[in-house]
Image (cartoon, rainbow, N blue to C red):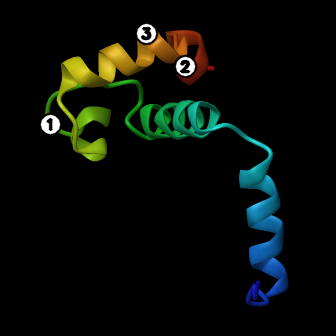
């Protein structure tokens, strides 16, 4: 099996991603977006708009992933 070589920077990024589950990555990303939106979940300029998902879907994801205000207001 042939695997292409990657620049050094990509190796570090892949190592970071390989050590985390998809749910962990999704949780971290949602929290970062919420921080950028100063905690606004839906409406114009809200995290749901940036993530291109309905506000109700974001609320459901937050509940499933255990994201609370303490995670993005810190």
Residue at 43% x, 9% y: name it: 63
Name the residue that disc number 2 marks. 73
Q: Is residue 31 above or below residue 51?
A: above
Residue 69 position, x and y percent, is 50, 11
Residue 31 position, x and y percent, is 52, 31
Q: What element carries label 3?
A: helix
Between 3 and 33, the one lying in front of the other is 3
Taking the image as shown, residue 72 lies to the left or right of residue 37, namely right
Q: What element carries label 2?
A: loop
Q: In this view, does 4 lie above or below 23?
A: below
Residue 16 position, x and y percent, is 78, 54
Q: How crowded is mark 3: few (under 14 residues within 10 Å), some or many (20 or more)?
A: few
- In which quadrant is the N terminus drawn? bottom right
Residue 42 falls in which quadrant of the image? Answer: top left
Between 71 and 52, the one lying in front of the other is 52
Q: How crowded is mark 1: few (under 14 residues within 10 Å), some or many (20 or more)?
A: few
How many marks do you count on the picture?
A: 3
* Contact check, label 1 and label 3, Cβ < 8 Å: no
Which label sits on residue 44? 1
Residue 62 falls in which quadrant of the image? Answer: top left
* Earlier residue among tags 1 and 2: 1
Which label sits on residue 63? 3
* Earlier residue among tags 2 and 3: 3
Taking the image as shown, residue 43 lies to the left or right of residue 19, namely left
Between 43 and 52, the one lying in front of the other is 52
* Earlier residue among tags 1 and 3: 1
Residue at 22% x, 44% y: name it: 52
Which label sits on residue 7? none
Q: Is residue 23 above or below residue 3?
A: above
């Amino acid at each position: 099996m042939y695997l292409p070589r990657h620049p050094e920077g990509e190796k570090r990024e892949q190592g970071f991603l390989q050590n985390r589950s998809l749910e962990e990555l999704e949780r971290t990303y949602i929290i970062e977006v919420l921080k950028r939106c100063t905690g606004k979940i839906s409406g114009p300029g809200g995290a749901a708009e940036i993530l291109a998902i309905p506000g109700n879907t974001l609320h459901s994801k937050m509940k499933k992933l255990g994201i609370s205000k303490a995670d993005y207001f810190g």
